[in-house]
């Protein structure tokens, strides 16, 4: 994660691109992304869907169209343009990578 984070911190410094990005920032053509207030992109390739409801053990996650998404915990791949129900036990934040990015992190999170 360190090289990825460093690269996007440098991009934030040099080009003004935020590291934490609203979904609409990364996917302006996907109308659903304009209304998502509880998930975000960390850089362009890592979707983070925190659990905000006390006691919840799963949550709905929207995976934007035009990409394939990989669950970093399980390695399961999903087509974009759909809502899924993500497992979210107390010790797990749903995390997805875009189009095969960050393969070294699959199962290591």
Image (cartoon, rainbow, N blue to C red):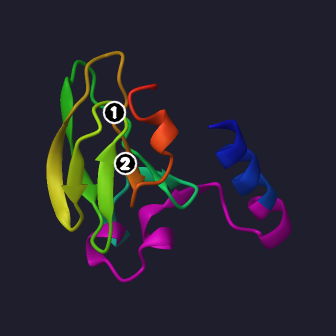
Q: Residue at x 41, y 35 (%)?
A: 106
Residue in the foreground of this view, choosing between 43 and 2 = 2
Q: Horizontal and vertical percent for residue 45?
A: 49, 57
In-image side of 24 versus 61 (left or right)? right
Dot 2 alpha-carbon crowd within 10 angstroms: few under 14, some 14 to 19, many 20 or more:
few
Q: Residue 36 at x, y = what percent? A: 33, 59
**Magenta segment range?**
11-33
Ranked by sequence position, the earlier of labels 1 and 2 is 2
Q: Residue at x 30, y 66 (%)?
A: 64
Disc sitting over residue 38 in the figure: 2
Figure label count: 2
Measured along the vertical axis of the image, is residue 107 above or below residue 43?
above
Position of 1 with respect to 46 (left or right) is right
Residue 76 vertical placement versus 16 (above, below): above
Farthest-out residue, right: 14
Residue 17 is situated, as x and y percent measured from the top left of the image, at 69, 67
Residue drawn 65% across and 47% down? 4
- Do the CB atoms of the residues marked 1 and 2 lie less than 8 Å apart? yes
- Could you say which is closer to the camera, residue 54 or residue 44? 44
- The local secondary structure at tag 2 comes to loop
Q: State which quarter of the image contains the C terminus.
A: top left
Tell me which corner region of the image, top left, top right, bottom left or bottom right, holds residue 95. Answer: top left
Label 1, on which residue? 52
Give the vertical position of 64 relative to 56 (above or below): below
Is 53 rendered above or below residue 70?
above
């Amino acid at each position: 994660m360190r090289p990825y984070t460093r690269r996007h911190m440098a991009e934030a410094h040099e080009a003004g691109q935020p590291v934490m990005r609203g979904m609409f920032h990364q996917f302006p053509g996907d109308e659903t992304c304009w209304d998502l207030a509880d998930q975000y992109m960390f850089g362009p390739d890592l979707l983070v869907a925190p659990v905000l409801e006390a006691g919840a053990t799963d949550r709905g996650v929207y995976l934007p169209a035009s990409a394939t998404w990989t669950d970093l915990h399980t390695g399961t791949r999903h087509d974009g343009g759909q809502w899924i129900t993500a497992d979210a036990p107390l010790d797990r934040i749903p995390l997805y990578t875009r189009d095969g990015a960050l393969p070294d992190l699959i199962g290591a999170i």
